[in-house]
Image (cartoon, coloured by chain):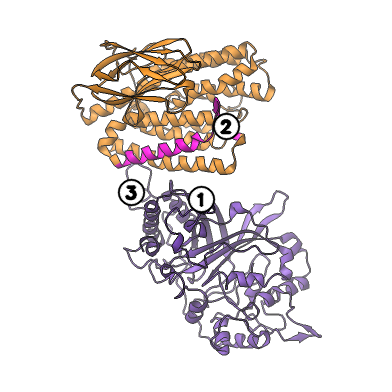
Chain colours: A purple, B orange
């Protein structure tokens, strides 16, 4: 939860548009800049409420188009399941890297359409050859599978300063390792990576199948650095989706950026002019594995939980309001106290006070227990933004005094530049970077 | 070897039926084995003077035909002598030449470019020299090339079985003499020869678990026997006490499997699957440290499995170069990458112990084996589709 997570998340309104859009509109050109808390709150809520509802989405089993201006898996309505993997490139040969990206693109094009990873498939090849698909997705529909690829800072320049692919000069300026934040307990072994693949689907087996096959194709070229399974999306990224609950039991993602608001996406999510040319139409991906200390959380009083988050646990309404999509009113007082405490997660993470917006797309995780019998669980936070510095970093810096910090620990961190979408059958992930 | 291995991973029932046995050619002497199956007569004798830092072969140009190499080791370390065709395909080799000994190697060499190699200490690429053989080039049909692969690999197996028996005998003798340190030193060496040819050993499914089973693999009422039983006594108990019956039984079982292996010729498809199976052994047993869980000498076995896998692939090389040269190039590259990865952990007289490897180092080894396996796993279909 970094930010928005639980709480903030909570803030948003309906399925409708983005609160921020209105917010910004009201303020003028703006930006994500700092906004006056009180006024903004009210504006936001209304704004959202009267945006037109989105059309009904596709069925959960349908295929999501692979080709497009942007990569799928960013503003695609969040699917239910995640398999995220970060990899290091083990070759120093630029052409081997390019060939891997071509091979990955071809396999991803097939798998997102509900097909086997390779042309022979799981059972269509020679009986003496290992099948070019691993087979566990036989008979399963596309299940909304999206595969989203990103490039980490170490792809451009290794940690020890080597420019092994001749890409150092093409590193986008914003693509730098995230700074340390107060309270971080980052484990380097499950952080960073030269490349990442985000696989999301409405069937966990489909997501796992996709990652497994892409990793297999990468043998000899990439080495898996770490991976994370997630379930239960913790954000809605479309107005057509209901707001889910995270493992704190609170609605999360109410006020998230939504796919339907193109102008806010252009402002906050998509890389435009003024950054690396090859990245235009792409986005920056930040991941944080946020362990929730659920046992202490579970034994804290309801009132404390709600004051920590800044929302009502049942309805998801901002404190002091009645319904989930009511605007967060930071000026409202109850019995002489602000309804939404200044240390609550919603207060600090809300765009009104963080002065920016990010597209959250996180998932809950439970990785068993921690050896002491406690649930090793939390939120695998994923955010997309136009620039990490004015996106996640700005939000997270604002959370230094967040009351929720008592209940969370950030244990992994990574940042990637996700190239724009694959345009057609001749295009491939990263072509503009590696051929340009 | 684990319980899982009892299903004979490299063999399907159909392949088992295809397993053939053939009379051993009786080539070579000692533990050496050359290409002259059927016992061709040597045209001449080529002297090889091996020391710890030199490998002087009396002649670097020979006429096509059968030659006898007489290898004298005047160094301080045990050595080996190889004749390699391209890609380190073993044309003939003699193992385990102790200091002061001379051993003969009989090899049939068609026209072509070869390399000779002495391996003092029995490790690494060895001290190489060029060997050119002139005369009429062989022209083999595809089927003949494949048949030759089986013969070549049988020759390799025979060279290993001799050394396996010798080193296991030495190990057993040390155990029975109560020499704990001596036995510990010999344990990974003896296993090297075993691990190189395990695809053949596994053909004889009942012997393999007796020789190489791990604790806990046994069925109810079965005793825990073999190399690992003695390994446990040496490293956990620090003793050889009570091990004499297990040592005797181990030697008897090894003798039996050596006799059987020497009479066995693997079909080309079995070679391909055996090469992959050896890499699987590395991935499932050595990377994890399961194989030598008491001694942690897993990298000795890793190196041996890798060499055995390469020997099986290289036996198929003449065929593969015609059928799929791109695959051969990829396999060469990945064997080299894996060997380079492993080479980092070579120590004086052996290998770093498994429990001293970091997670990162193990991942490097694992990644290279995974990549190599993907390539080697393509060989069987190329052979089957001929």
Check disc 2 and report the residue beneath it: B352
Callout 2 environment at 10 Å: few (<14), some (14 to 19), or many (20+)?
some
Numbered label tally: 3
Highlighted range, magenta? B326-354
Residue A411: x %, y % from top left: 65, 58
Which circle marks residue A224 in the picture?
Answer: 1
Q: Is residue B283 left or right of residue A35?
A: left
Residue B230 placement (x, y as % from top left): 61, 20
Q: Main secondary structure of the magenta part?
A: helix
**Quarter residue B145 falls in:** top left
Q: Is B331 left or right of A174, judged from the image as shown?
A: left
Q: Which residue position holds label 3?
A: A124
Q: Nearer the viewer, residue A21 or A295?
A: A21
Q: Residue at x 28, y 25 (%)?
A: B148
Q: Residues within 10 Å of mark 1 (few under 14, many from 20)?
A: many
Q: Is residue A142 above or below residue A270?
A: above
Figure quadrant of the N terminus of chain A = bottom right
Of residues A425 and B16, which is closer to you in this image?
A425
Which SS class for mark 2?
loop
The image shows residue A135 at horizontal and vertical percentages of 42, 50
Q: CA distance from mark 3 to mark 2?
A: 44 Å
């Amino acid at each position: 939860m970094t930010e928005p997570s639980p709480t903030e998340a909570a803030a948003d309104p309906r399925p409708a548009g983005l609160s921020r859009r209105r917010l910004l509109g009201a303020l003028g050109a703006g930006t994500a800049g700092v906004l006056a808390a009180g006024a903004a709150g009210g504006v936001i809520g209304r704004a959202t409420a009267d945006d037109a509802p989105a059309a009904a989405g596709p069925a959960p089993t349908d295929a999501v188009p692979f080709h497009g201006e942007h990569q799928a898996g960013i503003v695609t309505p969040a699917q239910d399941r995640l398999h995220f993997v970060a990899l290091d490139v083990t070759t120093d040969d630029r052409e081997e890297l390019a060939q891997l990206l071509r091979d990955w693109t071809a396999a991803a094009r097939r798998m997102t359409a509900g097909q086997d990873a390779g042309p022979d498939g799981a059972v269509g090849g020679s009986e003496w050859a290992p099948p070019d698909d691993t087979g566990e997705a036989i008979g399963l529909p596309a299940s909304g599978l999206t595969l989203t690829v990103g490039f980490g800072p170490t792809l451009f320049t290794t940690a020890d300063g080597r420019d092994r692919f001749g890409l150092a000069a093409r590193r986008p300026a914003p693509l730098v390792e995230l700074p340390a934040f107060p309270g971080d307990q980052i484990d380097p072994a499950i952080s960073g990576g030269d490349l990442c693949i985000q696989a999301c689907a409405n069937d966990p087996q489909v997501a796992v199948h996709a990652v497994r096959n892409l990793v297999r194709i990468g043998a000899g070229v990439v080495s898996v650095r770490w991976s994370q399974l997630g379930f239960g999306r913790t954000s809605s990224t479309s107005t057509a989706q209901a707001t889910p609950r995270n493992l704190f039991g609170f609605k999360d993602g109410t006020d998230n950026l939504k796919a339907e608001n193109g102008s806010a996406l252009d402002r906050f999510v998509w890389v435009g002019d003024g950054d690396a040319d090859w990245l235009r139409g792409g986005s920056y991906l930040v991941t944080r594995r946020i362990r929730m200390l659920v046992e202490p959380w579970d034994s804290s009083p309801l009132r404390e939980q709600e004051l920590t988050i800044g929302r009502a646990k049942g309805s998801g309404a901002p404190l002091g309001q009645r319904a989930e999509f009511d605007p967060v009113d930071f000026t409202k007082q109850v019995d002489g106290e602000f309804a939404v405490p200044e240390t609550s997660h919603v207060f600090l993470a809300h765009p009104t006070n963080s002065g920016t917006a990010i597209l959250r797309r996180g998932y809950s995780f439970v990785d068993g227990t921690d050896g002491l019998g406690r649930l090793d669980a939390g939120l695998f936070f994923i955010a997309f933004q136009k620039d990490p510095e004015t996106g996640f970093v700005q939000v997270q810096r604002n959370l230094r005094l967040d009351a929720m910090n008592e209940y969370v620990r950030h244990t992994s961190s990574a940042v990637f530049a996700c190239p724009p979408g694959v345009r057609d059958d001749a295009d491939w992930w990263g072509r503009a970077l590696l051929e340009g | 070897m684990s319980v899982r291995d009892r299903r004979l991973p490299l063999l399907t029932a159909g392949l088992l039926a295809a397993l053939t046995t053939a009379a051993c050619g009786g080539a070579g002497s000692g533990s050496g084995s050359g290409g002259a199956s059927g016992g061709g007569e040597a045209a001449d004798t080529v002297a090889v003077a091996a020391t710890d830092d030199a490998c002087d072969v009396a002649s670097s140009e020979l006429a096509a035909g059968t030659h006898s190499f007489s290898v004298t080791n005047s160094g301080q370390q045990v050595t080996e002598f190889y004749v390699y065709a391209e890609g380190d395909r073993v044309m003939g080799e003699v193992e385990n030449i102790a200091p002061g000994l001379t051993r003969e190697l009989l090899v049939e060499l068609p026209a072509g470019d070869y390399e000779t190699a002495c391996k003092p200490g029995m490790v690494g690429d060895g001290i190489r020299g060029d060997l050119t053989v002139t005369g009429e080039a062989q022209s083999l049909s595809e089927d003949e090339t494949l048949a030759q692969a089986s013969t070549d690999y049988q020759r390799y197996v025979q060279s290993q079985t001799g050394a396996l028996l010798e080193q296991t005998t030495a190990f057993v003798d040390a155990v029975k003499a109560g020499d704990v340190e001596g036995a510990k030193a010999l344990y990974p060496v003896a296993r090297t020869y075993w691990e190189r040819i395990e695809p053949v050993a596994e053909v004889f499914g009942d012997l393999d678990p007796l020789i190489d089973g791990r604790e806990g693999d046994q069925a109810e009422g079965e005793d825990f026997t073999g190399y690992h039983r003695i390994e446990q006594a040496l490293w956990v108990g620090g003793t050889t006490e009570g091990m004499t019956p297990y040592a005797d039984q181990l030697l008897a079982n090894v003798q039996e499997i050596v006799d059987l292996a020497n009479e066995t010729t693997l079909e080309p498809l079995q070679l391909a699957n055996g090469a992959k199976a050896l890499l699987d052994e590395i991935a499932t047993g050595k990377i994890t440290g399961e194989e030598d869980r008491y001694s942690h000498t897993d990298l000795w076995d890793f190196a041996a499995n890798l060499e055995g896998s390469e020997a099986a692939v290289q036996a198929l090389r003449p065929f593969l170069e015609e059928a799929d040269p791109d695959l051969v190039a990829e396999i060469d590259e990945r064997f080299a990458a894996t060997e380079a990865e492993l080479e980092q952990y070579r120590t004086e007289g052996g290998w770093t112990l498994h429990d001293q490897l970091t997670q990162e180092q193990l991942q490097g080894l694992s990644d290279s084996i995974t990549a190599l396996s993907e390539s080697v796993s393509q060989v069987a279909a190329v052979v089957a589709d001929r």
